[in-house]
Amino acid sequence: MERTLFFSGNEAIAHGAVRAGAVFACGYPGTPSTEILETAARLEGIHAQWCVNEKVALETAVGASLAGRRAIVTMKHVGLNVAADPFMTLSLTGVNGGLVIVSADDPGMHSSQNEQDNRAYAKFAKVPMLEPSDSQEAYDFVAEAFALSEEFDTPVLLRSTTRLSHGRGQVIPRVSVVLEPRDYARDISKYVMVPQYARLRNRLVLERFQKLRARAEESSLNVLEAGTADVGIIAAGVAYTYAREAFPKAWFLKLGMSHPLPSRKVARLFQQVARVAVVEELDPFIEEQVRALGLPVVGKEALPADGELDQDIVFRALEPFLSRRPPRRRRPVFPPAPRLADTPQPAAGLPVRPPVLCPGCTHRSVFTALRRHKLAPMGDIGCYTLGALPPLLALDSCLCMGASIGMMAGFNKALGRKAAAAVIGDSTFFHSGVTPLIDAYYNEADGLVVVLDNRTTAMTGHQGHPGTGLRPDRSQGPTVDIKKLCEGIGVRCHTVDANDFGVLDAAIKAEVDAPGLGVVVALAPCVLMVREKAGEILVDDERCNLCGLCLDLGCPALAPAEGTVSVTDVCTGCGLCIEVCRRGALSYAGASGAGAEGAR
Amino acid sequence: MNGTTTVSLVGVGGQGILLAAAILAETASAEGLDVKASEVKGMAQRGGSVLSTVRFGQNVWSPVARHADVVIAMELLEGHRGLGLLVPQGTLVCATTTRIVPGSVLRREEEYPGDLSAAAAARGVRLIAVDAEALAREAGTLRAVNVALLGAASTVLPFAAASWRRGLAAAVPAKILEVNERAFALGRGAVSNEEVGP
């Protein structure tokens, strides 16, 4: 077909992503990864953007994936440390559109502060890792990675190293991948990682890993290459090219998918030859797994555990070992599939008692207002995550601290319209919501961010944060004003009293309808810190037809009674039920259209 | 097992389960025993079920145990749930007049369980049913339900009255110590006067 191209590994990854149907690319620059995104920015059919950091980049890519698009996110090895929070839980949620994370490692630290071996992250998160060894594979493996991502519902790590990223080679272009469009559908048990759902997903991850192990055995990415010498070499990435050149007659197990390790293919190599070596840069990642099979292998006792390899180092290091008398043959012991913990069975016939939003909690008001609009609400971590559960069903996602805003931005960017909103607490906003807001502004993402400002870190027991200035000893320190902070960034921001539902509802509606990016700060102190009751709620039994609108608020103070609802003594008198009732059946005691004032 | 006694305290977030557990642990400590305790906090605080476990004996290793010799339940539904935690011939001390109805029951998706004494008898468990709310009210505050119930439970735990006094003083803030001492004494006194099952 087309002419052969001459690409660096990084250029090949970018072209490979477009060929694989990826439409969204983002990352943070870092040697040796930078040119992937720079190349993508010059290509048709893919949106490329720099993000404020790698965590926000990954969360933004997750948003694009959730919207049903294939997304690729690029960073250097230490960047994955910054993105580790979303990365680890992303393994649990899985993906919608395929999601590939490129980690470009830097053995020898040409331009880095450390030399960490990011294959450890694949093991840590139990996700597959692909390691191309030249530009053609870099180009081809991207499509393989996307296919694996969607088939196994997992993010896939694509690991490069300096010599792959910045090395050059011929690339034969391939026919573009034709994709079935994927729609977004709310699935809280998959995307809202509260404990009850995360436990389920975690088991699926463990089962998925066993399936990936089976796939590694049959995958054409892992090739047993016959040789003529009585030695075998296991290698992946550029290390394979060094070993291939140093020992042209050896047998090879070439691992394109270096995690999980195909143990039976390893054992087959041992059946063919007397001596086996593992050639890998940095950690004895493959070597340790081979040793765990009970197979004698030459590795880091011969090859350096730091810095880069090349064919001379590999030859000089292994020649003496491979010419020695072979060890006694041994039978491999394959790792058994791990058992899973017994799941505790709930007591039969007894009602469950899950945690719920407190009566009078103003988060419920925000959710009620937000539910009136067709936006996928990206959630975050705090008490308000409980709003994702029935009956409110008010949040679609919970990935990690501060993920809501980046996910919203990626979702909306990928679809080219304001289709998602973000809901984040005040303490979480300070934790890691500011950087994605800066990012969303810089990248001109559409969106509505609601900051649930209850003036505390409520879920963990009312700790202070920069918005309140409270220190652990309850003394007062300086405070940061969220509205000024947003406006300082350049983002439109309105602060509204979350106790005033009419004002809150109008502010959210105005922002939903407004173009671009806006923040609504829904301000009201946590109801647990407010002792006084705002008023008595009365029910007009004649008017109430038990339609369920108020019961759908999930308020512990409302219960259905015979043909009507009853208000229990845990009611704080917040009055949200009055707002949602369409028949005027609920009212404050002593009020004649004057709201709560008469009852106070 | 191995001379270790396990007491589990169950109820609903906000009922003062952790304080009751702290008093119990301090009391066991005052007896010169080895004590370990554990609880799950966080999400459970928002109206969810809460479980706290206190273990004491000559040498206690693990902070958790699957089964308890005594379960102290601050609420009727949690008392029913607590039956599943008890060893055979164990004792359930339950605030049977306290009902905190969960959302699923309010929405009529599930039913609040009925008679606890029948359920306890069916399992061969000794039930000490206590009107802890009435006792707490009598002591001076409804918030002392937890300590009133602990007072009732003290009748089946092997600790001297002086150790309980030391445990209360060590765990309860000085401002509310007196009312809690009253609640404890009322709970302790109530059991001998009440019908004790099964």
Image: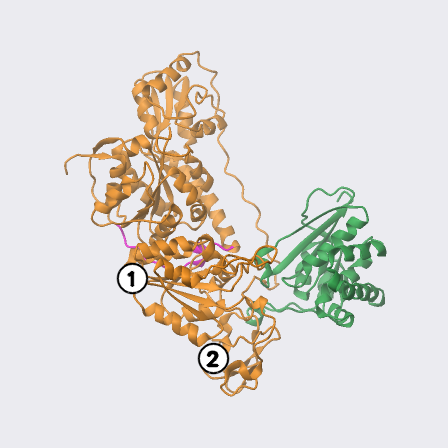
**CA separation in Å, label 2 and label 1:** 32 Å
In this structure image, what is the colour of chain B? green
**SS class of the residue under badge 1?**
loop
Residue A165 horizontal side relative to residue B161, left or right = left
- Name the residue that disc number 1 marks: A417
Q: Nearer the viewer, residue B187 or A309?
A: A309
Q: Which mark is residue B145?
A: none
With respect to residue A94, does B116 lie above or below?
Answer: below
Q: Which residues are magenta?
A: A179-194
* Residue nearest the viewer, comparing A329 with A546: A546
Give percent across and percent down for residue A262: 41, 32
Q: Is residue A41 left or right of residue A388?
A: left
Answer whether residue A192 is magenta in the image.
yes
Which chain's colour is orange?
A
Per the picture, the main secondary structure of the magenta-coloured stretch is loop
Q: Chain of mark 2?
A: A
